[in-house]
């Protein structure tokens, strides 16, 4: 099944190169020896806890901490007023009460004037133990004056809507990005409008408009967010153990926020218990642990509980989309226009590249070839938690893929055409690559039809349709859903992409020790992706060093080169490329050293895995291990060749890579209860070269479960008073082993032409592609009831209401 | 309150607050960090350990309730002979990614296999349905537990 080259095996039975290999990191995890932030223990360490707002929107009249301070074991209580009094030598505001977001907005570390969402940080208690800190929260008296709140994004711009960001002098709830824009447009507005108008007036065409909500969900990694801060009062060195997907970028943000010199800040991200985007942002709790250590002179640990995680840290989606698709009656797509209302919560805390404030949403044209497309995204503030990049979305590509794949199915239903046939008619053809989309992306490579046919074959599509027809005839409701997605991952080219001015290139360092063992130092940070294994395999592939001889070091800014971190599926496309490039630098240098040792010209040497040999005389050769020792020894080196066998590289990707896939989901729906059972799920991914197919498949499995969760269960909704209705795992439902079917995976391999090893990145593919397949399957099942669309999550209640012709909004508690 | 608990074969005695959760006792008092804490509502199962050889979510129990009982944690799975087959199964089948839910899954998995050496994949799915994994989509966890059932301690592969 897995298409990888034949590679030699090491003495320990590992592939010296690409291929499935057991993970190196598993040895500690199966022994319970992982080291997560909450496992960090330091002498004299104190514990922090955060008092959070019960209101979505309220004035703070007073905060009285005296009873809390009097509790034995409490060391300090910090309020917004105290933070306001701490001067900060920084360009980003003159005190500690506010901090910058990753989108050039500001966010309160602790509320001073008002609270703006339920769960917002109001006070920080530091105590000798976790229980005492929590006890003290009960003793803080806050006098609030409740204000009307904005919970419905559709009402945020009403003339009489309460203004949330009066702190910035705003008079409405619009969001202005750093370039001064209040809406974010892409594509050809006029051409698209004309094409759609023309289609409306053409009897041989159809135009379908559908309102599609991608509701607010949460990444909810099993490990919540937390940090341990230790500011050494003598040296001034801040060491911060923290749940960060981007330790280097966070270090720079702390330098900006705290005004601390960057060379005195060390950020350590130890083992991370899942990220999914939740650990990209800098949260008030992290900053408070730093402030707490400054105030007390001791290490301070803060680890949030599950409700805090769900209610205050980075949510995902919350996109109200209206899509219009025009096509000929033969099914040739002509144009797509999209209007989006984007709910950003109370602070604009999305982590998108600066020039892409709506992320990469304008990849919504999908995998299809048509000339006209346009989108307009309007962001607004609401009284909800900030965030918005998170949950394995490839910078809003999840929303984009869901939109186009739902629209195409709506179109298929209107045309009474098979959705597979409709897709096949419109897929971009192999000879069109590199393909420039109407919104400006340059897709690097793809053989879409081939991948789709593999999926249809694996699923037994024609048989499934026959089975469906038979079942319908006897009143059983089975559905088949298809999704074909294309993502752009590996942000990104420095000239186009940065976060807070930091270009999205990543550094790497490779040291070959005298005995031929190696250390590879990465800027990116694993949250479970298996970097310690796959990066060793990349070096093994390039240099012939067995992967067990390569130690991968990551997650410590003092011991790794600068880079932007792991999110948006960027590790393999960016740092994976860097690993290949730095290995090739070593190989080139090794050639010069081998030539000196063999007393020949470098041109006389040829490379075979792990060894430079004299052409035509393979007995005369030096292995990479020989060369490592020679490079550290007394061999006279050629002019210009320094000793040792180390190298560094910074990889600036020339373009994104564009993985894609075709997913087919089969469901059975009970029309009496609305209950959906996912019976089968076929996923065929093309992520280019697969470094470790076992790990690639594991990444896909996890993303498919996300898709089941979001399509059927997961939701952060609110009532009109601003209460979060998804604030615990009792209410925020995640898929278990019972909801997930036995995934059926397939693959095609179309390497990226611009990536050194042809890999494309796969961490988010399944999360991006799977929700549409599930929803399309459910709608397909209940389409005999006249249903063309229903919003996620398709809980039994929502499916039942859709069948009754009475859908309700999912994002608000309405009856 | 003074309590004595046998943890992985060793008696430990501590004076604890009556309200202290067993998960916090294991982690904070004993410094054994393999048992994790992932939610506040007993939904996630990252804190599963054994009390008298039965899997229990240790956030649902007070430490004082374990007084006089035997506790086994993930740290107790490995023996002088090496990894337990359930641990090996998770490595062999890529049954973990971030590793956070893994200790709880290992404890439940070992128990399921002990109770039923001929366990089916459907029975495994039901057996772990009270525990959440966000990384693996469960397929490989099911396979890993099945691997342990198929390769008991005295089998050729583990001998």
Image (tube, coloured by chain):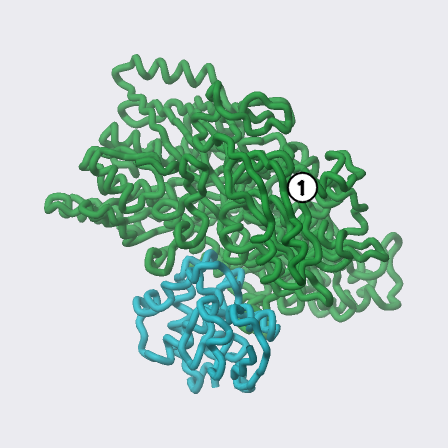
Chain colours: A green, B cyan
Q: Quadrant of residue A297?
A: bottom right
Specify whether A512 is left or right of A688: right
Residue A533 vertical placement versus B120 (above, below):
above
Chain letter for the residue marked with disc 1 in the picture: A
Q: Residues within 10 Å of mark 1 (few under 14, many from 20)?
A: many
Q: Residue at x 48, y 84 (%)?
A: B68
Q: Residue at x 78, y 60 (%)?
A: A645
Q: Residue at x 65, y 34 (%)?
A: A106
Q: Quadrant of residue A657?
A: top right
Residue A804 vertical placement versus A226 (above, below):
above
Which quadrant holds the C terminus of chain A? top left
Residue B63 spot, x, y in % from top left: 51, 74
Question: Residue A814 or B104: which is nearer the viewer?
Answer: A814
Which quadrant holds the N terminus of chain A? bottom left
Does the image show residue B94?
Answer: no
Residue named by callout 1: A80
**Numbered disc 1: secondary structure:** helix
Question: Residue A308 or A74: which is nearer the viewer?
Answer: A74
Residue A710 spot, x, y in % from top left: 39, 46
Specify whether A586 is left or right of A691: right
Specify whether A603 is left or right of B12: right
């Amino acid at each position: 099944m897995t298409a990888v080259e034949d590679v030699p095996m090491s003495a320990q039975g590992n592939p010296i190169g690409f291929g499935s290999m057991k993970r190196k990191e598993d040895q500690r995890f199966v022994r319970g020896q992982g080291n997560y932030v909450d496992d960090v223990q330091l002498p004299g360490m104190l514990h922090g806890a955060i008092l959070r707002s019960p209101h979505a929107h309220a004035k703070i009249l007073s905060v009285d901490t005296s009873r809390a301070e009097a509790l034995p074991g409490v060391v300090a209580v910090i309020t917004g007023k105290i933070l306001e009094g701490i001067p900060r030598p920084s360009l980003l505001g003159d005190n500690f009460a506010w901090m910058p977001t990753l989108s050039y907005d500001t966010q309160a570390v602790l509320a001073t004037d008002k609270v703006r969402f339920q769960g917002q940080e109001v006070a920080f208690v530091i105590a000798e133990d976790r229980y005492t800190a929590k006890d003290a929260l009960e003793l803080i008296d806050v006098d609030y004056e409740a204000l009307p709140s904005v919970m419905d994004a559709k009402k945020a711009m009403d003339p009489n809507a309460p203004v949330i960001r009066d702190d910035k002098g705003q008079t409405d709830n619009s969001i202005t990005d750093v370039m001064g824009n209040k809406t974010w447009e892409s594509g050809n507005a006029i051409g698209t409008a004309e094409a759609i108008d023309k289609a409306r007036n053409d009897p041989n065409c159809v135009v379908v408009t559908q309102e599609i909500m991608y509701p607010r969900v949460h990444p909810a990694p099993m490990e919540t967010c937390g940090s341990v801060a230790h500011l050494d009062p003598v040296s001034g060195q801040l060491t911060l153990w923290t749940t960060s997907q981007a330790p280097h970028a966070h270090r720079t943000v702390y330098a900006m926020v705290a005004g601390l010199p960057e060379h005195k800040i060390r950020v350590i991200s130890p083992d991370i218990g899942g990220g999914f985007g939740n650990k990209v942002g800098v949260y008030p709790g992290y900053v408070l642990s730093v402030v707490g250590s400054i105030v007390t002179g001791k290490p301070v640990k803060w680890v949030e509980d599950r409700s805090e995680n769900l209610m205050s840290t980075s949510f995902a989606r919350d996109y109200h989309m209206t899509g219009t698709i025009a096509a000929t009656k033969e099914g040739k797509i002509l144009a797509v226009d999209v209007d989006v209302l984007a709910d950003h919560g109370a602070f604009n805390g999305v982590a998108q590249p600066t020039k892409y404030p709506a992320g990469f949403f304008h990849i919504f044209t999908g995998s299809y070839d048509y000339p006209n497309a346009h989108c307009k995204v309007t962001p607004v503030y609401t009284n909800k938690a900030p965030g918005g990049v998170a949950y394995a979305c490839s910078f809003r590509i999840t929303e984009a893929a869901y939109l186009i794949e739902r629209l195409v199915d709506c179109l298929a239903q209107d045309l009474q055409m098979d959705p597979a046939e409709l897709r096949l008619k419109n897929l971009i053809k192999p000879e069109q690559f590199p393909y420039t989309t109407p919104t400006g992306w340059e897709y690097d490579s793809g053989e879409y039809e081939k991948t789709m046919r593999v999926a249809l074959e694996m699923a037994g599509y024609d048989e499934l349709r026959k089975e469906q027809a038979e079942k319908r005839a006897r009143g059983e409701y089975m559905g088949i859903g298809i999704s074909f997605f294309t993502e752009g991952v590996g942000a990104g080219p420095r000239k186009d992409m940065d976060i807070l001015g930091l270009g999205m290139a990543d550094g790497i360092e490779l040291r070959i020790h005298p005995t031929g063992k190696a250390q590879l130092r990465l800027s990116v940070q694993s949250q479970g992706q298996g970097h310690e294994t796959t990066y060793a395999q990349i070096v093994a592939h390039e240099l012939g060093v067995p992967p067990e001889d390569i130690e991968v070091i990551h997650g410590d800014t003092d011991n790794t080169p600068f880079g932007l971190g792991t999110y948006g599926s960027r590790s393999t496309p960016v740092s994976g490329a860097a690993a290949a490039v730095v290995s090739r630098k070593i190989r080139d240098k090794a050639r010069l050293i081998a030539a000196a040792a063999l007393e020949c010209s470098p041109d006389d040497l040829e490379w075979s895995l792990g060894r430079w040999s004299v052409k035509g005389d393979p007995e005369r050769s030096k292995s990479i291990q020989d060369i490592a020792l020679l490079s550290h020894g007394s061999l006279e080196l050629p002019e210009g060749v320094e000793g040792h066998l180390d190298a560094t590289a910074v990889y600036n990707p020339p373009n994104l890579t564009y993985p894609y896939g075709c997913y087919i989901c089969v469901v059975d729906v009970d029309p009496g209860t609305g209950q959906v059972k996912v019976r089968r799920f076929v996923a065929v991914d093309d992520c280019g070269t697969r470094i470790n197919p076992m790990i690639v498949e594991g990444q896909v499995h996890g993303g498919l479960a996300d898709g089941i969760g979001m399509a059927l269960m997961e939701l952060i909704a609110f009532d009109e008073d601003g209460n979060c209705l998804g604030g615990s795992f009792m209410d925020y439902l995640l898929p278990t082993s019972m909801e997930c079917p036995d995934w059926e995976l397939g693959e095609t391999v179309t390497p990226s032409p611009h990536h050194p090893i042809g890999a494309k990145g796969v961490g988010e593919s399944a999360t991006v592609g799977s929700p549409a397949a599930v929803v399309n399957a459910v709608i397909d099942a209940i389409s005999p009831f006249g249903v063309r669309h229903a919003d996620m999550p398709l809980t039994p209640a929502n499916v039942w209401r859709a069948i009754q012709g009475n859908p309700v909004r999912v994002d608000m508690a309405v009856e | 309150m003074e309590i004595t608990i046998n943890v992985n074969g060793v008696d430990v005695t501590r004076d604890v607050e009556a309200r202290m959760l067993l998960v916090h006792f294991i982690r904070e008092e004993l410094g054994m960090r393999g048992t994790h804490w992932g939610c506040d509502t007993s939904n996630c199962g990252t804190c599963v350990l054994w009390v008298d050889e039965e899997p229990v979510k240790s956030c649902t129990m007070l430490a004082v309730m374990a007084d006089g009982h035997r506790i086994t944690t993930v740290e107790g799975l490995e023996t002088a002979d090496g990894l337990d087959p359930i641990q090996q199964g998770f490595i062999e089948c890529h049954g973990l990614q971030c590793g956070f839910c893994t200790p709880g899954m290992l404890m439940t998995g070992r128990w399921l296999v002990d109770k039923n050496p001929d366990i089916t994949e459907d029975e495994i799915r039901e057996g772990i349905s009270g525990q959440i994994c966000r990384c693996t989509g469960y397929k490989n966890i099911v396979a890993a537990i099945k691997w342990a059932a198929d390769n008991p301690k005295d089998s050729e592969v583990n001998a």
